[in-house]
């Protein structure tokens, strides 16, 4: 049985014109410099000012403190999960050296994709806001770019390695009087081992 998203919260029901105020409140809550009560008081005043600015043409109910509190809790859970994901990625990255960084990039990109999927399917339960969606999309784009850069870097390193091998073998072959065929065989052997 598929479980539905459930009822939208009071904050999720606010019109798009309120998005900047919601994002402001989310930033304030994440900063943890002020109490939730102080943030809610300013949030309430900003909402009232928005209603006054639209001279009654924009109608919405300002969420209660308890609705704001529930939103704050969801945001805290989401923020903590994202921090845990970041901590895990950092811990895993310390176990990989530069030669294995390509694998780490792929793992991180897949982890971000999984996290995005979980958050989207959890919907309102996860406190998934437009700003969170943008941040995750930016993270996914960065991970995809990192995969691309990582692949390009690997290709560049392989090309430089090949050039260094060829130069070194040619230098040694010339100094030792090896035939061109022997030098090419040595290059093939070294580069073949590197490729596998």
Image: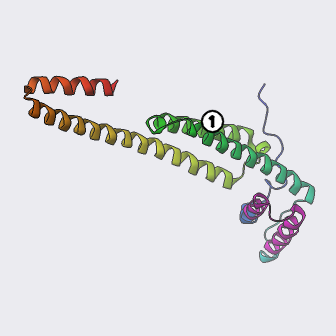
Determine the residue positioned at 57% across, 39% down.
Answer: 94
Residue for badge 1: 114
Determine the residue positioned at 61% across, 40% down.
Answer: 89
Query: Measured from the top left, where is residue 160 in percent x and y?
Result: 28, 41
State whether residue 56 appears in this view.
no
**Quadrant of the image containing the N terminus:** top right
**Which secondary structure, mark 1?**
helix
Position of residue 100 in the picture relative to residue 38 (left or right): left
Which quarter of the figure has residue 170?
top left
Asked if the stretch drawn in magenta spans residue 25, the answer is: yes
Query: Measured from the top left, where is residue 11 in percent x and y?
Result: 81, 56
Asked if the stretch drawn in magenta spans residue 194, the answer is: no
Query: Measured from the top left, where is residue 64 in percent x and y?
Result: 91, 59
- Give the residues in magenta: 22-51
Determine the residue positioned at 84% across, 50% down.
Answer: 73
State the scheme by which the image is colored.
Answer: rainbow
Relative vertical location of residue 75 with respect to residue 89 in this rendering, above or below: below
Determine the residue positioned at 46% across, 37% down.
Answer: 102
Q: Nearer the viewer, residue 167 or 118?
A: 167
Main SS of the magenta segment? helix
Residue extending farthest to the front is 176
Q: Nearer the viewer, residue 147 or 153?
A: 153
Position of residue 36 in the picture relative to residue 85 (left or right): right
State whether residue 180 appears in this view.
yes
Which quarter of the figure has residue 175?
top left
């Amino acid at each position: 049985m598929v479980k539905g998203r459930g009822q939208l919260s009071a904050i999720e029901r606010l019109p798009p014109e309120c998005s900047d105020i919601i994002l402001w409140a989310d930033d304030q809550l994440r900063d943890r410099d002020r109490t939730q009560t102080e943030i809610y008081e300013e949030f309430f005043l900003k909402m009232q000012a928005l209603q006054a600015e639209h001279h009654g043409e924009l109608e919405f109910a300002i969420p209660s403190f308890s609705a704001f509190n529930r939103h704050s809790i969801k945001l805290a859970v989401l923020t903590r999960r994202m921090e845990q994901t970041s901590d895990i990625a950092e811990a895993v990255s310390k176990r990989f050296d530069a030669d294995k960084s390509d694998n780490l990039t792929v793992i991180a990109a897949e982890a971000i994709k999984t996290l995005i999927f979980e958050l989207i399917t959890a919907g309102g339960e996860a406190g998934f806001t437009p700003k969170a969606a943008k941040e995750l999309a930016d993270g996914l784009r960065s991970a995809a770019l990192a995969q691309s850069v990582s692949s390009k870097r690997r290709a560049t390193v392989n090309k430089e390695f090949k050039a260094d091998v060829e130069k070194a073998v040619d230098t040694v072959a010339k100094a030792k009087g090896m035939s061109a065929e022997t030098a090419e065989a040595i290059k093939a052997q070294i580069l073949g081992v590197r490729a596998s």
